[in-house]
Image: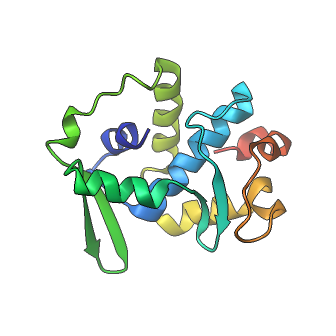
Amino acid sequence: MLFVFLRAITGEKKIPKTKLAKLLYLSDFAWFYNKHESMSGLEYRKFEHGPVPDYYFRLLEELESDSKIIIESKEKALLISETRVGEKVGEDLISGEEKKLIKKIVKRWDNKNTKEIVGFAHSQIPYTFVDKGDIIPYELITQEDPEHVY
């Protein structure tokens, strides 16, 4: 999923770490909204800057140490981009339908800043319903208005 997002964004092909986490969340929960199953199988927790999968930070560290992504600091943000090694990572674990949803989500949020997507995720029922640090149940997204899923 991460590489599909990195390849779908426009411009410099760099994305803030926080924004990427929210895009992953939106795609996972939008998929659940329609299919009643997670796209990634990851659990998300409520943190100050929004929902984040438990595995996210470790995954980024592993991908960076394997030279598949670069994480660089720019002002207050950490920007993630794909390397030449990362370009060789296939997308065969993601179905065509899943890629289509990811691209729709990228199209909606590509030109928005991190603060906007964080605000959106914070306003959703799944995030508002749970306490800080708790796992966010996927099932809560089914209570959301269709226009407010992503």
- Quadrant in which the N terminus is drawn: top left
- In the rendered structure, the answer to whether residue 35 lies left or right of residue 112 reads right
- Residue 81 lies, with reference to residue 104, above or below; the image says below
- Quadrant in which the C terminus is drawn: top right
Looking at this view, name the residue that lies furthest to the left.
84
Res 144 quadrant in image: top right
- Residue 26 lies, with reference to residue 37, above or below; the image says below
From the top left corner, tell me how far across and down residue 130 is, in percent: 80, 63
Which residue occupies 83% across, 61% down?
Answer: 129
Looking at this view, name the residue that lies furthest to the top.
96
Looking at this view, name the residue that lies furthest to the bottom.
75
Which residue occupies 80% across, 55% down?
Answer: 125
Residue 125 visible within the image: yes
48 and 103: which one is in front?
48
From the top left corner, tell me how far across and down residue 132 is, in percent: 73, 71
Which residue occupies 74% across, 60% down?
Answer: 127
